[in-house]
Image (cartoon, coloured by chain):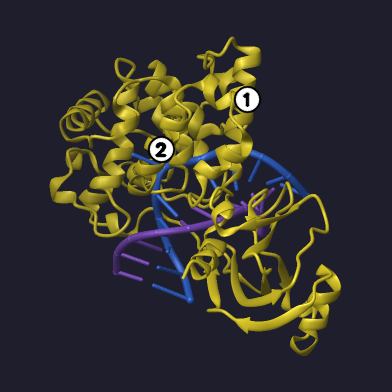
Chain colours: A yellow, B purple, C blue
Amino acid sequence: MKNNQLPVTINIPQFRHDLITWFEQEQRDLPWRENQDPYRVWVSEIMLQQTKVETVIPYFHRFIQSFPTLEALAEADEQQVLKAWEGLGYYSRVRNLQAAVREVVADYNAKVPEDAEQFGNLKGVGPYTQGAVLSIAYGKAEPAVDGNVMRVLSRILLIQEDIAKAKTRKIFEQAVRQLISHENPSAFNQGLMELGALICTPRNPSCLLCPVQVHCKAYSEGIQHSLPVKTKKTKQKDEAYYVLVMEDKDGKYILEQRPNEGLLAQMWQFPMVATKEVSENLLEPYIMERYQINCQSIDQLQPVKHIFSHIKWDLNVIKCRCDKLRVSGPAQQILSLDEIESYPLPVSHQKIYKQLLQ
DNA sequence: AAGTCGGGGCT
DNA sequence: AGCCCAGACTT
């Protein structure tokens, strides 16, 4: 064990007390705080990855209602699980969660393991989620370092490492190991995050209301606005597609499932063709050839722009009416608007679906 | 270490 | 347009 700890020169017992007392008083009333059920805590932590609390709340209620227990989720149909996640994004989170829950049923008698290594080895459980669930559900004194914690501690301890770099997280984990309350690790970890969400915000932190202001080195030097240090990342790539909305005389449409891996894996969509694959004037014969249909008419629907974190989609939505549709593979279905409702669609294709309802 | 993976809300 | 959000995984 190397002893290269950063200097933590604040009054640690006082800091713990100030933080935990504030958290006990001011914490928000959130559905996953009703009890310490490890399954519920786990679900909430997965949902909260890169996702705001207000966004998660309705999803959490519906998800727990549909899958109230670890066993229920383990036994659930994968498509229904994906449908419950529809609109939340980062869909591999829920596929990993179900795989992990099935592991817990198979290997740990359906009890979420308390052992850090065992829990941390489950699919989709990284360093943050590991510490968060073990501290909140089981009271273990493990660090749970997320973006909030790095921002808060970078200011309090005046840490200037670039938080965009992967190895920087370890510096903060070491700091938390020195600071954390062993009497109440749960309130300590959640207090740091709650502080980051409510007071020690990215812009314009409310330092005058901060319960640990007296401990904060950045505040005492007046440089809280310039922390944390974070380098910016690369911008999105542009991608353009035709989206083929093919409707037959019965009002049914072709829907296809995306591949098992990659972007929006296993989600359903109207067929897409990269615009660079086929020139616009050859689109009609291309559709007729590829989908073996007889186009009666072609119209343009409202185009859709959709921005991911790393891609910008420009969707040229083409509606073609035809006599008869046929599937050309196992990943396709011919469905009525009603039936499409039960399939998990990414938000970009929900926008298209809503146009068809009008 | 850098990319991939969603979506929404804010400035 | 860019940034942020209770990050994990792949290459």
Residue placed furthest toward the bottom: A281
Distance between the alpha carbons at the discs numbered 2 and 1: 27 Å
Q: In this view, does A14 lie above or below A292?
A: above
The chain under label 2 reads A
Query: x, y (%) of residue A108?
Result: 60, 12
The part of the image, by quadrant, that contains residue A238 is bottom right
Query: x, y (%) of residue A274?
Result: 73, 73
Q: Which residue is drawn at 83% across and 59% down?
A: A328
Mark seen at residue A214: none
The part of the image, by quadrant, that contains residue A60 is top left
Mark seen at residue A121: 1
Check disc 1 and report its element: helix, strand or loop. Answer: loop
Nearest to the observer: residue A290 or residue A147: A290
**Pointer 2 residue:** A62
Q: Is residue B3 above or below residue A165?
A: below
Mark closer to the observer (2, 1): 2
Q: Residue at x 36, y 43 (%)?
A: A58
- The amino acid sitting under disc 2 is Arg
Q: Residue at x 19, y 28 (%)?
A: A24
